[in-house]
Amino acid sequence: MTHIPPPAEELRLLDTELRRLDARRAQLLARRAWLITALQQARPLAATAPQPVAPVEPRREATAPGVQNVLLLLGGVLLTVAAMVFTLVSWGHLGIVGRSAVLGAVTLGVLAAPVALLRRSLRSTAEAVAGLGLALTVLDAYALHEAAFRGSDGTTYLAVCTTVLALLWTAYGTALGALRLPRPAALVVAQFPVPLWVAAAGGGLWPAAAGVLLTAGFDVAVALRGSARPVRLTAVVCGIGSGAWGVLAAGVLALEASGPAGAGRAAVLFALAAAIAVAAAWRSPRSDAAQVIAAVGGLLLVAGAGGVLRVTVSDAWLMPALLVCGIALLAAVRVPEAVRRGLGVASAVVQGLALLSALPAVAATVLGPLGRIGDVWSGTPVDARDAATLGGVWPSGAETAPLVLALVAAVLVVRGGVWRQWALPPAWAAVVVLPAALQLPYAVGLSVQGLAVAGLLAAATATAPVALWLAVVTSVAVAFVSLATEAATLTVLAVLTALFAAAARQGRHAPVTAAVSLGYATALAGAAGAAAGWRPEHVALLVLVVSVAAALLAPRITDPATVLAVEITGAVAGAVAIGLAVFDAPLLALVLALCGVIAAGTAIRPDRRGVGYAAAVLFVLATWVRLAAWQVDLVEAYTLPVTVPALAVGFLRRHRDPAVSSWAAYGAGLAATLLPSLAAVQHDPEWLRPLLLGTAALLVTLLGARHRLQAPLVLGGAVLVLVALHELAPYLVQMADALPRWVPPALAGLLLLGVGATYEQRLRDVRRVREVLGRMG
């Protein structure tokens, strides 16, 4: 609560505080006067006139050249629209002479105007007028068709017009070299004459595609040789567009081809497009662009060859043939470095696609045997493919998957450097898939995959860490494949156990190899017991041998990670044994006890003391299961085997360290028996259990009071009171029924009045009890 001093004392404190504030205020005022004097000496006393503020000009949101270009563009567009309206709408009001005179005069005048504008250095205006003139030439062509050539073939007329316009615009732009618009516009129009002439001559898709590709080649030449930047940019865009159209047409022809002749014609188009791309990459001044273009050219070459191969070889051999074509791109050596790198990228893309085509076969070989878990020892398969797929469907065309994988691995090895380290996965996949792809005998397939595991473990021990995980994956696959027959299962599991154990002895990757070896040893124990005709609960005893071996091996290993891996695997084997024996209570009790012995033996080591808790739990569980097997339903038979050792351990611990709390030493042991027995008392109509429990609780309470220990005193006293209330409950109920209805509320009111009247005394009593309990251990 807040303490308020007497008035005289409070007045003295206030006066002292006010004097301190007055002294501080005088100090601050003196400092302020000094600062004002210093500032007045540093600058003239006369006040200077305020400087005029410069007016802020409004921000301009557009530049003068930008405004000029917009105005010129709008003017050119409006004039072009007006010319179109005049040509399309008002044309009929004039005769043939008037029409020709008007359009000719206007077109010539507009085309001649830029000459005078350029002399006056009005370049932007000249560009706008020139654009209008070019548009008028298009309208002239339309007007000429309507006036004199209405009956002519439209395609032929378009071909003639585009050719003439391209030539005229090129000549006009060359004559007026300062203009940037005519020559790019001429290049755009030049994309149409060749396809239109082919269409006018009645040519099909192939001549049209060839013409478009030739036009793309012309665009590439202009892009490489052109001097003006707008012309080069336009040529690049037009070349990409025309080339894409030609390649698309070649692809359509290749897909529609039903024989070598049609595929060969499409291949010619692909080759033409590839030649244009490689030539462009060869002459390109930029190495990054050259690399991309060369990669496209290499892919086009392979696509052309693929179109021919599609109609000449079977589906199974199509991908190997394409892969050979892709690998052949790497043979280009006398080319610029950028082109060589681009062809290398194209070859890598083809090889990647080849690997993707082989993935279904690899997945079927590695993942297919997992389904045999439900078909154990069903009989010898027909061949390795039947063993891998369980008689299912093999991926179409996957017979040549090993060849594809081997070729990719060989290329990576030959290229050397950083590529060599990526050669192992495709080489591994080739070996794993080979037995199923060739439909080798079942035993041969197991042998090949077993040798692959041994080789991978040797490689992992030497230099290749990725080989370890490939070895683990392969071993799992071959283990599941071996489930087809009893002899194969036992042989393969024994070999795998020995291989991984030998690899663990080498020291490299020992944690993984040791754990895998013990895992296969566990499977071998289970398979051996099943082969002997044992029941699962008897097989559990055989599996425990692996846990014993792990517990004996762990202290002899120096690497901590390997020790941990071995112990975890041994614990898993023990859990498997417990799971096998779970349906036979007597054997389950024996297995739990043996697991407890193994854990207790491990806890002897100084760094594994904590395993002792697990050993205690296992022993207790073994005892409980044994009692359940004997059909013992007495609660104390389950709790006393826990309480007695727990109290003994607590006594020894407190004897060695008297500072240990009684709750830590005896709390768990006492609660293990007192609380379950107290719960059993609530449903026990007999008198013996309450009597024994009450007697035990009384003894525990007295011992706690004698030795001033908190845990026995609290637990024993609480149980004693609850047992007494349980025994007196019937009599209390009878008493309550005999009393009038107003007595319980009256008693409760009197109790509350008594508690309220002696509240402070009760608080002191509670504090005294708390202090007494606190002083106890």
Image (spheres, rainbow, N blue to C red):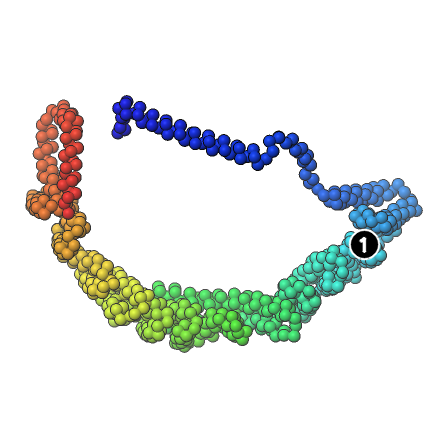
Task: Note whether 134 is above or below 210 in the view shown.
Answer: above
**Residue 607, percent across and down?**
25, 63
Residue at which label 1 appears: 178
Question: How many labels were placed on the picture?
Answer: 1
Task: Note whether 447 is above or below 281 in the view shown.
Answer: below
Residue drawn at x 19%, y 58% is: 616
Q: Secondary structure at mark 1?
A: loop
**Quarter occupied by residue 615:** bottom left
Q: Is residue 367 visible?
A: yes
Residue drawn at x 53%, y 33% is: 37
Q: Is residue 483 visible?
A: no
Looking at the rendered image, the quarter that the N terminus falls into is top left
Which of these two is toward me, 401 or 13? 13
**Quarter occupied by residue 614:** bottom left
Which of these two is toward me, 380 or 239? 239
**Residue 731, percent across and down?**
8, 34
Which of these two is toward me, 155 or 751? 751
Which of these two is toward me, 649 or 669? 649
Residue drawn at x 48%, y 65% is: 360
User: Quick one: label 1, few (<14), some, or many (20+) residues within 10 Å?
Assistant: some
Q: Amino acid at mark 1?
A: Ala
Residue drawn at x 56%, y 68% is: 348
- 330 sits left or right of 396 in the view: right
**Residue 424, percent across and down?**
47, 71
Task: Note whether 176 is above or below 419 in the view shown.
Answer: above
Q: Residue furthest right?
A: 97
**Residue 311, percent across and down?**
61, 70
